């Protein structure tokens, strides 16, 4: 084929430009560390990387949720444990108070200590979390749930429970209704009685002086019933604590699953969007050589002319 | 006898002088775009009979021809047109491509952050800071929608002004071609049919520049003129007269520049859809297949989110026990009336079923008795108006005449309109509607709102919000990639066509140098012949004198 001078010139310039384009692209890739500079480089890869990025975001959000759930469950558990401690102390005091060696005065002192435990219980049942939400108010979490009135403690919360998402398909209930934990505890007579009521009855029984065998027997009966009621309450509290523990376990297990998934998704994301540096650097070297070759041949070819010999 | 030699020598001198001139002309134009190298055709002069045989009488210039192949030129023109089209399309599509997926401006990160904030409210429904963050993320999502819309709109403005500029260029090229046609017809006539090579080169170059802007077809005339047609047969240049294209809004949208052709009688007809190839074809194609699609798809996400989120939000209860209001601003479809409508009033168009919405635009046209709804993309009729996810009420239109039309773009400007209306964080309806003002810790509705991130409530219940946006990115990415591949292969075809043309018509300086030598030596030799003939004459004179 015949070759014209402008063709030689243009082809030379164009091959330099092409080499420069390739080189500049690789340079951008190396600079950003990304294989895909814009979606058109690999449309399906780009969409895949967006989906994976979104999955990473969701998993990280579930982790945040799990952390917050754990904090709340742990706070509830601490409260329940303290209540259990108090209850066990009351149980000891009841046994002590029922002892024949006690006098009316010593029993009144015991009753005083139980009244203190009851006051503590009221405080514990009205515990708040860091956000100022009452832990045992159900969904009415801004109002103080347990109100000490003349005729006993009234529950102002509800029996709702809030669920928090810890994976795409899994929610965990946080916050327990105070109604169930402290109020509706079955007593020996087949009725429901609150722990406050149980304490109040014990205090009342211990405070009433024993003067004769009859009142002595009444105290005995009352203490016997109190022990039964306390055991019922203890059962409910331990049940609550177990449930809280089980939920914390669930969250922890799910958290581990989430972390595993996060690692997998991040690995997949890196495979889709990250640059293979070894490949890119060797490509860069190759392209650099190609550009130098194009430049050198251009200069050499341009020097060739018959006019040089005329 | 000697006068014969003198004549032969002189004819050689003249011919080689012409040869040197043409070689010089070639050398001078070796860098001129579109120049075809020229050659002197040398013929022997008719011989004279001298009794014992025919004696040669020297050389004459048969003509100066340009070395040119019409087939190759046509190929180059087509390749120029396609290459310009795809490379410009790619340049513009690439900007949209990068814009949509950028972590700074793209929608995906905004959606993710917004829904993370909704999750935080679901985890801590009574936390005012969490609620405040959710509103702030809603506003920043609005900003993303708005800025994406605006950047696409900027591209559209750029495309529209490119279209106007290109039409101006086409018009002035057409005028230049008409003028050149006149010169060529005149020059050819004066030379008795011999074509003016340099003018033909100039004209081919102008046609090529025209083809770079839009597809053209040419029909050569016997008198040397070249007629040029665009679109589906609209004459742009006939002989020495040029027609003008008009770039102006021709449809319902006053911002949408179309291509008009002023026919006989001065009526301007819209020929936009016939304009293919070249830069104009690229711009028109880009506007409809990339910008319209992108803005409509972006709007679809905006409408979907605003409608569905509000719907759920209004089913909930806020921190003060009140039923939830709108979280996002309620959006409306865009309705544009054709400028020549005789009807008064506009159709009332509202969003009905978000799941049925698509990125399609519709045209509502009065056929004389009824209003018809047709898809804007392919003009296909829509029988059941509710099937497009809109509630359209034409009862407010009066005095309609046949041909009156309205353009309905359900989601075109939705991304621009998108915004939050909620300001008070306590108004976020995180709880289920219970009427109990105290159940502030309830997160039932917030969970449902957070669940929207993964709910398939678009495209007939097959796509999530992110999915819809990802589809757009995939589509634009694929189109850009195709344009990239096409522009590269067209560039190669253009290279080949140019190489082909240059190989035939281009000047090779070495070849011209050789010709220069050849003609120079021949010229010197012819001068020697004259010298010899003069010596012969002197010899004879001396012989006679003696």
Image: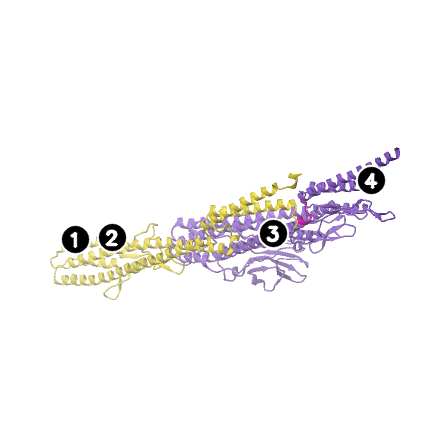
Judging from the image, what secondary structure is the residue with disc 1 in? helix
Q: Earlier in the sequence, mark 1 or mark 2?
A: 1
The residue tagged 3 is B492
Q: Badge 1: how crowded within 10 Å, few (<14), some, or many (20+)?
A: some
Residue A181 position by quadrant: bottom left
Judging from the image, what secondary structure is the residue with disc 4 in? helix
Judging from the image, what secondary structure is the residue with disc 3 in? helix
Percent across and percent down for residue B278 are 64, 51
Judging from the image, what secondary structure is the residue with disc 2 in? helix
Determine the CA span between mark 3 and mark 4. Answer: 55 Å
The residue tagged 2 is A120
The residue tagged 4 is B6
The reply to whether the C-beta atoms of the residues labelled 1 and 2 are less than 8 Å apart is: no
Camera-nearest label, 1 or 3: 3
Chain in purple colour: B
The reply to whether the C-beta atoms of the residues labelled 2 and 4 are less than 8 Å apart is: no
């Amino acid at each position: 084929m015949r070759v014209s001078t402008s063709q030689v010139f243009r082809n030379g310039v164009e091959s330099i430009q092409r080499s420069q384009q390739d080189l500049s692209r690789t340079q951008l890739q190396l600079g950003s560390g990304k294989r895909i500079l814009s979606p058109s480089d690999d449309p399906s890869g780009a969409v895949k990387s967006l989906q994976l990025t979104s999955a990473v975001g969701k998993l990280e959000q579930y982790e945040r949720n799990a952390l917050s759930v754990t904090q709340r469950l742990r706070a509830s558990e601490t409260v329940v444990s303290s209540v259990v401690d108090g209850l066990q102390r009351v149980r000891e005091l009841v046994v002590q108070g029922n002892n024949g060696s006690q006098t009316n005065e010593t029993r009144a002192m015991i009753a005083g200590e139980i009244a203190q435990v009851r006051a503590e219980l009221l405080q514990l049942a009205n515990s708040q979390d860091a956000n100022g939400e009452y832990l045992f108010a159900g969904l009415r979490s801004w109002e103080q749930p347990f109100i000490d009135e003349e005729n006993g403690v009234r529950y102002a919360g509800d029996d709702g429970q809030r669920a928090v998402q810890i994976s795409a398909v899994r929610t965990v209930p946080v916050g327990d209704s105070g109604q169930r934990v402290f109020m509706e505890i079955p007593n020996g007579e087949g009725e429901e009685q609150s722990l406050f009521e149980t304490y109040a009855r014990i205090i009342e029984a211990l405070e009433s002086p024993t003067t004769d065998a009859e009142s002595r027997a009444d105290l005995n009966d009352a203490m016997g019933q109190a022990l039964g009621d306390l055991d019922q309450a203890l059962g409910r509290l331990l049940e609550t604590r177990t449930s809280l523990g089980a939920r914390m376990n669930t969250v922890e297990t799910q958290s581990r699953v989430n972390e595993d998934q996060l690692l997998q998704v991040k690995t997949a994301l890196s495979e889709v969007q990250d640059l293979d540096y070894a490949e890119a650097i060797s490509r860069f070297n190759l392209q650099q050589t190609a550009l130098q070759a194009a430049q050198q041949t251009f200069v050499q070819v341009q020097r060739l002319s018959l006019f040089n010999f005329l | 006898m000697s006068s014969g030699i003198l004549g032969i020598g002189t004819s050689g001198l003249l011919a080689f002088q012409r040869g040197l001139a043409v070689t010089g002309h070639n050398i001078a134009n070796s860098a001129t775009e579109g120049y075809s190298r020229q050659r002197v055709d040398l013929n022997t002069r008719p011989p004279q009979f001298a009794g014992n045989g025919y004696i040669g009488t020297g050389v004459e210039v048969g003509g100066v021809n340009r070395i040119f192949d019409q087939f190759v030129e046509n190929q180059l023109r087509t390749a120029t047109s396609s290459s310009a089209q795809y490379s410009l399309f790619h340049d513009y599509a690439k900007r949209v491509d990068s814009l949509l997926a950028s972590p700074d401006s793209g929608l995906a990160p905004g959606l993710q952050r917004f829904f993370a904030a909704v999750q935080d409210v679901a985890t801590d429904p009574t936390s005012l800071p969490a609620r405040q963050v959710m509103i702030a993320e809603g506003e920043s999502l609005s900003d993303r929608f708005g800025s994406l819309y605006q950047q696409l709109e900027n591209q559209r403005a750029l495309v529209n002004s490119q279209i106007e500029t290109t039409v101006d260029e086409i018009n002035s090229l057409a005028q230049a071609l008409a003028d050149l046609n006149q010169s060529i017809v005149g020059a050819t006539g004066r030379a008795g049919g011999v074509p003016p090579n340099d003018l033909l080169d100039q004209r081919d170059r102008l046609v090529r520049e025209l083809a770079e802007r839009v597809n053209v077809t040419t029909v050569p005339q016997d008198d040397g003129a070249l007629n040029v047609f665009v679109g589906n047969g609209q004459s742009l240049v006939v002989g020495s007269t040029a027609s003008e294209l008009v770039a102006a809004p021709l449809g319902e949208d006053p911002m949408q520049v179309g291509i008009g052709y002023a026919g006989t009688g001065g009526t301007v007809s819209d020929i936009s859809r016939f304009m293919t190839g070249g830069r104009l074809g690229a711009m028109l194609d880009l506007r409809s297949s990339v910008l319209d699609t992108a803005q409509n798809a972006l709007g679809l996400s905006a409408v979907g989110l605003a409608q569905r989120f509000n719907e759920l939000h209004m089913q909930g209860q806020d921190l003060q026990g009140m039923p939830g209001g709108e979280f996002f601003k309620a959006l409306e479809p865009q309705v544009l009336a054709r400028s020549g409508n005789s009807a008064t009033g506009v159709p009332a168009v509202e969003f009905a079923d978000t799941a049925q919405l698509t990125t399609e635009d519709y045209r509502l046209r009065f056929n004389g008795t009824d209003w018809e709804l047709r898809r804007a993309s392919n003009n296909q009729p829509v029988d059941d108006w509710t099937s497009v996810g809109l509630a359209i009420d034409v009862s407010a239109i009066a005095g309609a005449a046949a041909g009156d039309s309205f353009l309905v773009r359900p989601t075109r400007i939705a991304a621009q309109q998108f915004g939050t209306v909620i300001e008070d964080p306590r108004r976020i309806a995180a709880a289920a509607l219970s009427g109990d003002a105290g159940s502030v810790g309830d997160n039932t509705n917030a969970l449902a709102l957070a669940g929207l991130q993964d709910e398939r409530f678009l495209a007939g219940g097959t796509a999530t919000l992110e999915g819809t946006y990802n589809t757009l990115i995939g589509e634009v990415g694929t189109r850009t990639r195709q344009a990239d591949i096409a522009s590269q292969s067209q560039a190669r075809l253009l290279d080949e066509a140019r190489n082909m043309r240059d190989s035939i018509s281009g000047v090779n300086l070495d070849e011209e140098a050789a010709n220069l030598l050849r003609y120079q030596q021949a010229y010197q030799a012819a001068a020697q012949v004259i010298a010899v003939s003069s010596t012969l004459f002197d010899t004879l004179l001396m012989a006679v004198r003696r």
